[in-house]
């Protein structure tokens, strides 16, 4: 079973890298996200999500240099949030330092009915976000193991 997947893309407005390793899909996004970057991001996320063989996994958004998203791009990426949830993503966490970008992300999560509130999922250090993710994955694993005969 393959345990590592990756993708990257860059245009004049922004860029991203995606890596899936140890049950965590890490998206490092910088700059402003327009429709072209959003389409590429959505395609790459869908490809990686379709290849993930883990039953439950997590998403970490590293958005320290993320400036925001256009409304058209947000509509394109909304399907990514839903696809991840439908494919086994049980927790997401974010490292974000720009208030406008955090607000946009919170609105997008609300639009696609993702709970809990984004404020519970934001961290300043990657180590703290990974610790949180691993704790949630461990709880899910324990629950699944308990429910299986």
Image: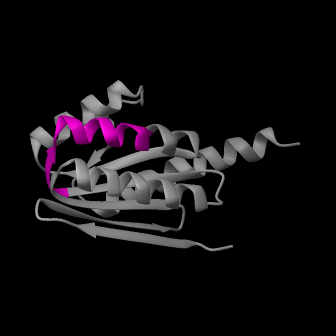
Q: Which picture quadrant has residue 26? A: bottom left
Q: On the rendered structure, is 113 left or right of 69?
A: right
Report the magenta stretch's main SS. helix
Residue drawn 34% across the image and 32% down it: 109
In reply to whether residue 71 is colored magenta, the answer given is yes
Q: Position of residue 81 (x, y in %)?
A: 42, 40
Q: Residue furthest right?
A: 149
Q: Is residue 136 above or below residue 52?
A: above
In reply to whether residue 129 is colored magenta, the answer given is no
Residue drawn 16% across the image and 61% down it: 14
Residue drawn 34% across the image and 57% down it: 40
Q: Quadrant of the N terminus?
A: bottom right
In this rendering, the count of numbered labels is 0
Coloring basis for residues: one colour
Q: Position of residue 19 (x, y in %)?
A: 42, 68
Tell which of 13 and 126 is nearer to you.
Answer: 13
Tell which of 120 and 106 is nearer to you.
Answer: 106
Q: Position of residue 15 (x, y in %)?
A: 21, 64
Q: Position of residue 63 (x, y in %)?
A: 22, 55
Residue drawn 77% across the image and 42% down it: 146
Q: Which picture quadrant has residue 131? A: bottom left
Q: On the rendered structure, is 55 left or right of 31?
A: right
Q: Quadrant of the C terminus?
A: top right
Highlighted range, magenta: 64-81
């Amino acid at each position: 079973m393959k345990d590592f997947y990756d993708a990257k893309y860059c245009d004049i407005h922004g860029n991203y890298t995606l890596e899936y390793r140890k049950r965590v899909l890490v998206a490092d996004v910088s700059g402003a996200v327009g429709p072209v970057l959003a389409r590429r991001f959505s395609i790459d996320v869908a490809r990686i999500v379709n290849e993930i063989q883990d039953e439950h996994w997590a998403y970490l958004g590293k958005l320290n240099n993320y400036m925001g998203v256009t409304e058209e791009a947000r509509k394109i990426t909304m399907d990514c949030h839903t696809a991840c949830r439908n494919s086994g993503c049980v927790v997401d966490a974010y490292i974000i330092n720009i208030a406008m970008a955090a607000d946009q992300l919170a609105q997008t999560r609300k639009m696609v009915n993702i709970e809990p509130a984004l404020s519970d999922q934001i961290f300043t250090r990657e180590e703290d976000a990974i610790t949180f993710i691993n704790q949630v994955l461990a709880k899910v694993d324990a629950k699944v193991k308990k429910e299986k005969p």
